[in-house]
Amino acid sequence: MKVENNLYRNLDVLKKIISKIDNSYKYVVSGSTSLAFQGVDVVPNDIDIFTDKAGVDYFYSILKRYTNEPPKIKETDEAISYYIKCFIDDVQVEIIGDFITKNQDGTFNESTINYDEILFKEYKNVSIPVMPLSLELIGYQQLNRIEKVKKIQEAMNLNKK
């Protein structure tokens, strides 16, 4: 039940965001909200929206009342990106631009985001762009998130049947 409650809560926030933006910037919903929306058995706790640096700046111009900080570079052991974090209706929303994962040796991977392969799923008359499970799988493999990889593979196998 928590999966569905969180999913619908997050989708309602996404609907609110999408209603404020124009279509001149490419973006895609990824992470746990995208996975749950596509039938993967995960609890979506936040919303991750991937775009490029200009897209992050654009989202910031529209959503700045929901954040305390301007966009910045965020680097972890796993990845580097240009980034803002917002809170909308108590949901954490991360807008992530130019996201690139790192290998354990410090080298970088190519981005797995391909805007030509985005899926559009309908929710309450709004078309939400989501990362296909095949690309989510690659991204989570690069981040070495074994549990999510297994859950994505299970959902992909169920979808084949």
Image: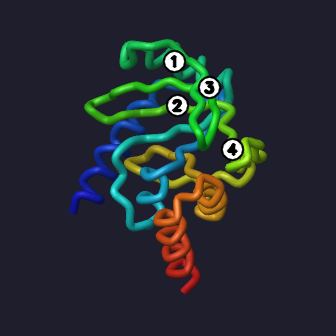
Q: Secondary structure under badge 2?
A: strand
Image spot of residue 125 (x, y percent): 43, 47
Numbered circle sitting on residue 95: 2
Q: Amino acid at mark 2?
A: Ile
Q: Amino acid at mark 4?
A: Lys
Taking the image as shown, residue 2 lies to the left or right of residue 13, namely left
Inter-mark Cα distance, 4 to 1: 26 Å
First reached walking from the N terminus: tag 1 or tag 2: 1
Task: Quadrant for the C terminus, please.
Answer: bottom right
First reached walking from the N terminus: tag 3 or tag 2: 3
First reached walking from the N terminus: tag 1 or tag 3: 1
Taking the image as shown, residue 27 lies to the left or right of residue 108, namely left
First reached walking from the N terminus: tag 4 or tag 1: 1
In this figure, which residue is indicated by the disc labeled 4?
Answer: 102
Q: Amino acid at mark 1?
A: Tyr
Numbered circle sitting on residue 82: 3
For marks 1 and 3, give the one nearer the viewer.
3
Please tell me which residue lies in front, 142 or 65.
142
Number of on-image labels: 4
Please tell me which residue lies in front, 15 or 48.
48
Inter-mark Cα distance, 1 to 2: 8 Å
Numbered circle sitting on residue 60: 1
Q: In the rendered structure, are the residues bearing label 1 and label 2 in contact, judged by CB atoms less than 8 Å apart?
A: yes
Inter-mark Cα distance, 3 to 2: 8 Å
Q: Residues within 10 Å of mark 4 (few under 14, many from 20)?
A: some
Q: Amino acid at mark 3?
A: Tyr
